[in-house]
Image: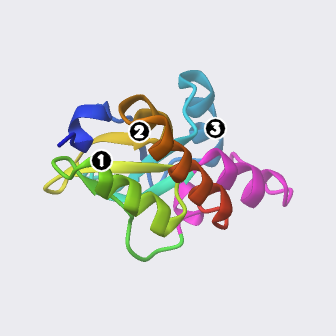
Amino acid sequence: MTTAREIMTPEADWIDLSASVAEAARRMGNSDYGALPVCDGEGHLQGVVTDRDIVVRVVATGDDPDSVQISDLLEGGEVITIGADDDVEEAIRTMKDHGVRRLPVIDGAELVGMVSQADIARALPDARVGDLVGSISDAPPNN
């Protein structure tokens, strides 16, 4: 059984709730990320902000990315995650059920990495990857 820990991108970078959207965009651009986990001042995971969130909910509406905080983009509710020791099939199920392309990986309450479609694609046979990509592509955009 392959686990999320084995395929994740470790040591996930994250951004504070109080940071500006412009700061998130700069960090995503500099590091070639499509998403950043969002944590509070104590490092507790609060959500995920994506490049799509920034474009659709800030830039396209004409808001100033320097004046909009990351906290303004979070919609509340449960943060969709995967446990570090959960198997890859659970990650696929979670991505499909929630229509997401990336999952924060947690170990207890600690953010330890991120699993993306690309991570799964490298770890699984092509047929399983195709099923995942097709299901997520058919789902409404989330992150």
Q: Which residue is mark 1?
A: 88
* 25 is higher (above) or lower (below) than 16: above
Measured Cα–Cα span from mark 3 to mark 2: 25 Å
Near-viewer residue (27 or 115): 115
Outermost residue, top side:
30
Q: Residues within 10 Å of mark 2 (few under 14, many from 20)?
A: many
Provide the residue span drawn in magenta: 50-74
Q: Is residue 67 visible?
A: no
Marked residue nearer the N-terminal end (1 or 2) = 1
| Residue 13 lies in quadrant | top left
Measured Cα–Cα span from mark 1 to mark 2: 7 Å
Image coordinates of residue 9 in percent, x first then y, are 35, 31
Near-viewer residue (116 or 66): 116
Cβ atoms at labels 3 and 1 below 8 Å apart: no
Marked residue nearer the N-terminal end (3 or 1) = 3
Question: Where, quadrant-wise, is the C terminus in this rendering?
Answer: bottom right
In percent of the image, x 45 and y 41: which residue is there?
Answer: 116
Q: Which residue is mark 2?
A: 120
Q: Nearer the viewer, mark 3 or mark 2?
A: 2
Q: Secondary structure at mark 3?
A: helix
In percent of the image, x 20 and y 53: which residue is there?
Answer: 86
Q: Is residue 120 visible?
A: yes
Q: Secondary structure at mark 2?
A: helix
Image coordinates of residue 73 in percent, x first then y, are 59, 63
Q: Which residue is mark 3?
A: 25
Q: Residues within 10 Å of mark 3 (few under 14, many from 20)?
A: many
Marked residue nearer the N-terminal end (3 or 2) = 3
Give amino acid for label 1.
Val
Cβ atoms at labels 3 and 2 below 8 Å apart: no
Cβ atoms at labels 1 and 2 below 8 Å apart: yes
Image coordinates of residue 7 in percent, x first then y, are 30, 33
